[in-house]
Amino acid sequence: MWGRASMAAVMVLLLAAHICTLNVVYAEGSITETGSSDPDAESILERATAWLWSQRDKDAGWGNDTHRVLLVLRMSNLSREDNVAPVAPLELQLSSKQMELEIVLLLWRHREIGFSPVRLARYTLALNAMCTDPRQFHGHDLIGTLQHHEPPTDYEFALTTLAACNAEAHVRKRQIRRLLDIANAAQDHNVDTVAMVILALKCIVQDHRHRNLHHYVRKPSIGLAQQQRLDGSFGDVRTTALVMQALEEAENEPADNWNRSAALSWLTSQQRVDGSFAGDVRVTAEALLGVAPRGLASIRTLKCGQGLDETSPPRFTTNGSNEPATISGNRNESVPTPLVTSGSSSSSSSSSSNSSNNNTNKVSIGNSGTTSNGNSGNNGIAGNNAGGNMVNVTSTDSMVMVVSVAAPVMVNVSYTLWVGSNVNETYSLIVTAPKNETFYEVMLLAAEMSPHFQFVASEWPNGHYVHTIAGYKEEPMSYHYWLLYRLTSTPDSSSPPGNQLVAPGGVDDLQISEGEHYLFWYKKL
């Protein structure tokens, strides 16, 4: 594994890669006929993508959801019929570099905080969609890492297998057998899991070695189609969009097995006036995958590198300039992020970066010249300011690109286990994770850190239900259950918390903040 010095060098080189984006022609224009002609889907896509652009931060990302938004914006601009992947717009490339920086930071700190296989899988899906090979990510094989951490739940296993398949990695027979076992017992699994398994299998059968598996998809696909409700949905927005992808990918299925028009109408009814779904970036991004021209199972078929000379305009762009479209009332309604400055402004841009908060890395990139702090630069990187985490590179043509690279805000939470009504056993960890991450992700990190925190959960439409931790399984007959508490101080067995401190939501609903204390207590009710 890389040392910190090597990782720092990779981060600097990654920042320097922004130079390449300056050579890309950013062609702007109206929506072109590159995807489906379905007017309902086009309307949903156009309004929702405009809202997503309006939510982009000044660092060219979307907080903890950059990879989700980047993936759906890319898929929305691809063609359903043509596998050749065109050059991504400059704005999307900048966001892609921001995501790559997030991944580098994750790899850099993984020994301290661990990482979630599910999050890594979503990163690799976005990288593949952007034609970046996750198997050769700056000297690191993300897919190899992913396949060494098999998730316990079936949904997450299907997702990580889908990510590996889309990267054209070898999917082991054992993994295929597990997917087929789930497909054959689809009635015992929730809608989300069956849909994700179908997507994974549809990706796998694109490999000529596994063509004979396509008929295994038919039965679970028919059963999934029968889950459609009278209002056209399959559950909530996320589930409906996921099922729409799975059924779109199912071959040789009669069109009357499910009503796509009804599903689209239901999605349209859920979309707000501003174009968002529930006013939430993550929900909006997941909803769009259901109506994008290409789904998650088709990333594997993209032909990257063949459309580099094409200048066809993107279907869904920003507002016609290099600035994200703004919608009144949204969070980036303020001054747009500066992308390129010239001449005398380069000095002021760099000097203002020196006075910025140390939590934000301001980066100027170019070819050669003299940096604002007086050091000479030559074809790359110069003037590294240790106090402010600065990398300044100027250009002889007086063009300087200023990129704000904000590291994810990391928070520390304590996670404690109590076993027994009288607290016969106790285990505790401090877990570091991105702010606003779900407690379920914290549990996954904790399970990587200590075997005492390994757990088993059932999957339900509204999230995960944890029934076994540290080998202790809930026993309804004797009224022994796991109860989750969210506390303001470290739990004390001599003064146990009351029922009023039981967490207000499930493990997927709780978003963590600095200094919080979580207690899972196995006790008799």
Image (cartoon, rainbow, N blue to C red):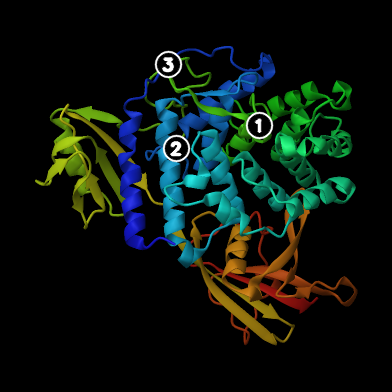
Regarding residue 514, the answer to whether it shows in the image is: no
**256 or 330: nearer the eye?**
256
Pointer 1 or 2: first along the chain: 2
Label 2 crowd bin: few (<14), some (14–19), many (20+), radius 10 Å = many
* Residues at discs 1 and 2 in contact (Cβ within 8 Å): no
**From the viewer's perspective, is residue 327 above or below residue 17?**
above
Indicate the amino acid at tag 2: Ser
Q: Quadrant of residue 331?
A: top left
Q: Which is closer to the viewer, label 1 or label 2?
A: 1
**From the viewer's perspective, is residue 179 above or below residue 232?**
below
Pointer 1 or 3: first along the chain: 3
CA–CA distance in space, label 3 to label 2? 19 Å
Q: Disc 1 designates what residue?
A: 298
- For numbered disc 1, what is the local secondary structure? helix
**Residue at x-position 46% and y-position 24%:** 87
Residue 514, x across and y down, in percent: 47, 63
Pointer 3 or 2: first along the chain: 3
**From the viewer's perspective, is residue 524 above or below residue 512?**
below
Q: Disc 2 designates what residue?
A: 96
**From the viewer's perspective, is residue 357 above or below residue 18?**
below
The numbered dot on residue 44 is none
Question: In the picture, which quadrant includes the C terminus?
Answer: bottom right
- For numbered disc 2, what is the local secondary structure? helix
Residue 238 shown left or right of residue 346 in the figure: right
